[in-house]
Image (cartoon, grey):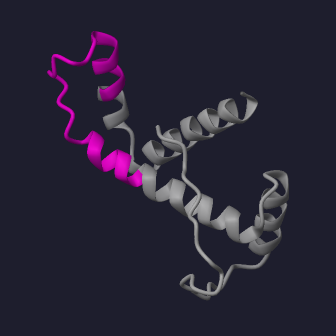
């Protein structure tokens, strides 16, 4: 998975969008942003970008055939089990893997 690229834009020229957050969510976002040493805006952008990338990854994975000669037996089994998961479970698994990859990259 490719690392998430930081968008380069000016706060004056960037699109703005008002979002109504449920009670407590603003505080949760602020805490997570502090833990990641980012502004709340940067945290929200990073998470939206990650979500969109994951969705795109899931959509592109659908085209991989189980009988593809490029896949090992182990990869075929993993792909078959992945496809048996609900869409929500697939998203959670991809998010977990992406988080682990991000953590490993930060440790390097």
Q: Does the magenta stretch include residue 2?
A: no
Q: Which of the 4 image quarters holds residue 82? A: top left
Q: Which of the 4 image quarters holds residue 8? A: bottom right
Where is residue 90 drawn, in percent x and y? 43, 43
Please indicate whether residue 65 sits to the left or right of residue 38 in the image: left
Q: Nearer the viewer, residue 9 or 53?
A: 9
Where is residue 41 drawn, in percent x and y? 70, 71
Q: Residue at coordinates 16% horizontally, 16% vertically from top-left? A: 69
* Rendered view: 77 above or below 63: above
Q: Which of 90 and 31 is in front in this view?
A: 31
Q: Residue at coordinates 66% horizontally, 33% vertically from top-left? A: 105
Q: Residue at coordinates 84% horizontally, 61% vertically from top-left? A: 31
Q: Is residue 60 magenta?
A: yes
How many numbered tags mark residues here? 0
Q: Nearer the viewer, residue 7 or 104?
A: 7
Quadrant including the C terminus: top right
Where is residue 76 drawn, in percent x and y? 28, 20
Where is residue 80 drawn, in percent x and y? 29, 27
* Rendered view: 93 above or below 27: above
Q: Residue at coordinates 24% horizontally, 42% vertically from top-left? A: 62
Boundaries of the magenta span: 55-79
């Amino acid at each position: 998975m490719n690392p998430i690229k930081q968008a380069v834009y000016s706060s004056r020229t960037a699109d703005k969008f008002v979002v109504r957050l449920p009670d407590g969510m603003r505080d949760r976002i602020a805490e997570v942003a502090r833990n990641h040493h980012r502004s709340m805006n940067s945290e929200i952008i990073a998470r939206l970008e990650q979500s969109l990338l994951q969705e795109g990854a899931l959509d592109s994975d659908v085209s991989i055939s189980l009988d593809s000669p490029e896949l090992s037996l182990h990869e075929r089994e993993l792909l078959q089990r992945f496809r048996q998961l609900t869409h929500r479970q697939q998203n959670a698994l991809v998010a977990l893997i992406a988080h682990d990859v991000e953590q490993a990259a930060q440790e390097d």
